């Protein structure tokens, strides 16, 4: 119910005011000190998409030293480790893993998408409800942004998979048609680790594959992502990697996470609690763990980071998750 959501947001905001954390690096927010700070924190409690705090993740981070995270990365070993990690998932079936090649390290999937936009010509195929940041980047270029199915042979298509706005069946049909049109297919799997349903994806048709754990784990400030590509891409990231100039701390931290937590970790840990939260607040689940829908609660639209922001119809429940059993839910 709307009143319950409002009450919960105030309880959390006041609690964060009393918290000793001066700055939340995950949310890029200072501690709310004044009444207006608390009011605004409560007002925008359910906007965005981010992971709830996790004591196990924070414990791992605290146990690591900078010296340990500065170690050189063996790219081939890193690639094999990630492939084997993908294969162990019981929730997510990833086909074509053994064919993945040309691993490139980056600071986020947005790095690789920015590179993709730079290398694209004429048209860029993308679904209208793709994560808004991609449209912010596209605004800076003279490309015709169009629906993926309108793209011609060789033109770039970026698919976000999964998506809270489209079903897996819809996305698979679009992918199949783009393959038949011989588009230059790319896929962003940033949201894959927060799926709440069994899901399958065949990576064989894609020229480029992007993956990070920034939406699954509370590590947004530790920038790290990977790209696999069918052919070597001679962009800034691959050239710097070849010369050993890359974010070793982020890459080593990524490696630590996948060595300590399975791909299904957040689903196994949070799914039952999320079902309980949705029931308490009369929310409808989406296909992503951190997002739900409400029939009578709408997020405010006066504090969005972009004109392309497209999550107003969705309720971010991450703060409800991390505060479960502290209050009335």
Image (cartoon, helix red, strand yellow):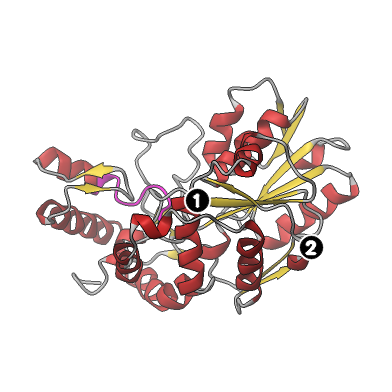
Using the image as rendered, state which of residue 95 and residue 67 is in the foreground: 67
48 within the magenta span: yes
Question: Which residue appears at 30% of the width and 45% of the height?
Answer: 44
The answer to whether residue 303 is above or below residue 284 is above
Q: Quadrant of residue 39?
A: top left
At numbered mark 1, what does the secondary structure look like: helix, strand or loop? loop
Q: Quadrant of residue 141?
A: top right
Q: Quadrant of residue 91?
A: bottom right
The answer to whether residue 289 is above or below residue 141 is below
Where residue 33 sits in the image (x, y, percent)?
10, 43
Give the CA separation, mark 2 to mark 1: 22 Å
Using the image as rendered, state which of residue 271 and residue 87 is in the foreground: 87
Q: What residue range appears in magenta?
A: 42-50
162 within the magenta span: no
Mark 1 Cα-neighbour bin, 10 Å: few <14, some 14–19, many ≥20? many
Where residue 45 sits in the image (x, y, percent)?
29, 50
How many marks do you count on the picture? 2
At numbered mark 2, what does the secondary structure look like: helix, strand or loop? helix
Q: Can you see residue 140?
A: yes
Where residue 27 sits in the image (x, y, percent)?
32, 47
Secondary structure, magenta segment, majority class: loop
Q: Describe residue 53's horizontal placement relative to residue 180 as left or right.
A: left
**On the image, numbered disc 2 is attached to which residue?**
99
Q: Describe residue 130's horizontal placement relative to residue 143 as left or right.
A: left
Question: Which residue appears at 51% of the width and 68% of the height?
Answer: 258
Q: Can you see residue 295?
A: no
First reached walking from the N terminus: tag 2 or tag 1: 2
**On the image, numbered disc 1 is attached to which residue?**
224
Q: Are marks 2 and 1 in contact (CB under 8 Å)?
A: no
Q: Classify the position of the C terminus by image quarter.
A: bottom left
């Amino acid at each position: 119910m709307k009143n319950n959501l409002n009450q919960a947001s105030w309880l959390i905001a006041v609690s964060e005011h009393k918290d000793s954390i001066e700055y939340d690096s995950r949310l890029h927010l200072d501690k709310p000190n004044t009444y207006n700070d608390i009011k605004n924190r409560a007002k925008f409690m359910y906007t965005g998409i981010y992971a709830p705090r996790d004591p196990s993740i924070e414990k791992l981070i605290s146990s690591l030293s900078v010296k340990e995270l500065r170690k050189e990365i063996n790219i081939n070993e890193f690639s094999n480790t990630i492939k084997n990690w993908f294969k162990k998932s019981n929730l997510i079936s990833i086909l074509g893993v053994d064919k993945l090649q040309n691993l490139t390290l980056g600071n986020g999937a947005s790095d690789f998408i920015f590179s993709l936009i730079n290398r694209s010509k004429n048209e860029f195929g993308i679904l209208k409800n793709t994560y808004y940041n991609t449209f912010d980047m596209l605004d800076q270029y003279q490309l015709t942004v169009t629906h993926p199915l309108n793209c011609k042979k060789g033109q770039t298509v970026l698919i976000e998979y999964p998506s809270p706005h489209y079903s897996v069946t819809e996305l698979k049909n679009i992918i199949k048609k783009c393959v038949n049109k011989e588009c230059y297919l790319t896929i962003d799997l940033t949201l894959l680790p927060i799926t709440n349903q069994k899901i399958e994806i065949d990576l064989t048709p894609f020229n480029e594959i992007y993956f990070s754990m920034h939406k699954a784990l509370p590590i947004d400030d530790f920038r790290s992502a990977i790209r696999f590509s069918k052919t070597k891409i001679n962009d800034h990231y691959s050239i710097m990697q070849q010369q050993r100039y890359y974010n070793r701390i982020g890459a080593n931290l990524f490696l630590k996470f996948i060595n300590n937590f399975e791909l299904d970790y957040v689903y196994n840990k949070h799914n039952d609690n999320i079902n309980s939260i949705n029931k308490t607040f009369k929310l409808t689940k989406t296909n992503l763990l951190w997002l739900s829908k409400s029939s009578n609660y709408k997020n405010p639209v006066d504090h969005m980071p972009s004109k392309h922001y497209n999550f107003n119809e969705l309720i971010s429940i991450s703060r409800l998750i991390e505060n479960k059993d502290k209050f009335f839910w």
